[in-house]
Amino acid sequence: MSNDSATEAFVAHRNLLFTVAYEMLGSAADAEDVLQETWLRWAGVDLDTVRDQRAYLVRITTRQALGRLRTLGRRKESYIGPWLPEPLLTTPDVAENIELADSVSMAMLLVLETLGPTERAVFVLREVFDLDYDEIAQAVDKSPAAVRQIAHRARAHVAARRPREVVSPAETRSALEAFQQAIETGNLQSLLDTLAPDVVLLTDGGGIKQAALAPVVGADSVASVMARIGTKASLQPAHVNGYPALIVRLNGEIDTVMAVRIDDGLITGLYAVRNPEKLSHMEREATLRR
């Protein structure tokens, strides 16, 4: 393969490959590493033997991501406190693509965390990227019949755990605006009015920043944690993982990224990422593609 042709093909599909790797790993840093490895392997391929460049590149990326996913699993076992996906600052057009936004939302990535590595790869390639079973079979080294069974199992598993309905970015923004205003004004009742009674707050400090080591459950407990933020921080709306979210800044620096899950107009899940190692991709927008 001439280097120019290889580079051209890789660049043309780069955003798609990053999205595949990120959805499989929940980590932008690891997804970038997978892309580096994919490029190194792709550069050594004879282009004349490749019938479908996109499918071939997705296959390399999937295999690299699967290897890394198993390593990540071991890392997560020794992680201090709740592990949350690495948040991505996304472009507004991601929010307009409801299916893409839903697939990279914090709530959905946390559901994908409950799948095994192969199940996760099959689910992502089939449900998000609509690859056919033969293509997926090559990517995960299984037979098409086995892949169909894995896809069926993974779909049922995800359906039982995903949000009840896909919430529009406008609904999320509306709930988030009321939530932000309640925090900024310090009005505890207004804050409680935005939270579902069984709301769950997960904070990821990674052992570096102060964070609750277990989920905080219930509107009263979550409200009292949130009420302490408004006095010392500034809150800035942003698009994170395809949906409206809040960036909490202290002295101008990003301190926390807060994403939410909304059900029936109320916040049922709050995901606060504080681990500074996970906030490096919040200074520039990531371009995602299906």
Image (spheres, rainbow, N blue to C red):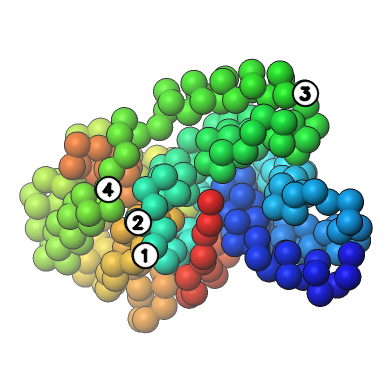
**What residue sits 32% from the left and 44% below the top?**
261
Q: Real-space Cα distance between discs 3 and 1?
A: 38 Å
Q: What residue does disc 4 label? A: 168
Other-residue count near label 4 (Cα within 10 Å), few / some / many at <14 / 14–19 / ≥20: some
Q: Could you tell which of marks 4 and 1 lies nearer the N-terminus?
A: 1
- Neighbour tally class for label 2: few under 14, some 14-19, many 20 plus, Cα within 10 Å: some
| Residue 111 in the figure: left or right of residue 184 | right
- Write the residue at 65% across / 56% down: 17
Vertical comparison of 125 with 290: above or below: above
- For badge 4, the amino acid type reads Ser
Asked whether residue 286 is in view, the answer is: yes
Q: Nearer the viewer's eye, disc 4 or disc 3?
A: 3
Residue beneath disc 3: 143
Residue 64 lies left or right of residue 158; in this view the side is right
Q: Distance of mark 4 from mark 1, alpha carbons?
A: 13 Å
The secondary element bearing badge 4 is classed as loop
Earlier residue among tags 4 and 3: 3
Is label 2 in contact with label 1 (beta carbons under 8 Å)? yes
Dot 3: element: loop
Circle 1 residue: 92
What amino acid type is highlighted by mark number 3? Ser
Taking depth in this image into account, of 49 and 224 the one nearest to the observer is 49
The residue drawn where x is 21% and y is 69% is: 231
Residue lying at 72% horizontally and 24% vertically, measured from the top left: 144
Amino acid type, label 2: Glu
Proximity of marks 4 and 3: CB atoms separated by less than 8 Å:
no
Residue 248 x/y as whole percent? 34, 68
Amino acid beneath label 1: Pro
Provide the residue designation for mark 2.
Answer: 96
- Residue 52 x, y percent position in the rendering: 75, 49
Marks 4/2: CA–CA distance:
9 Å
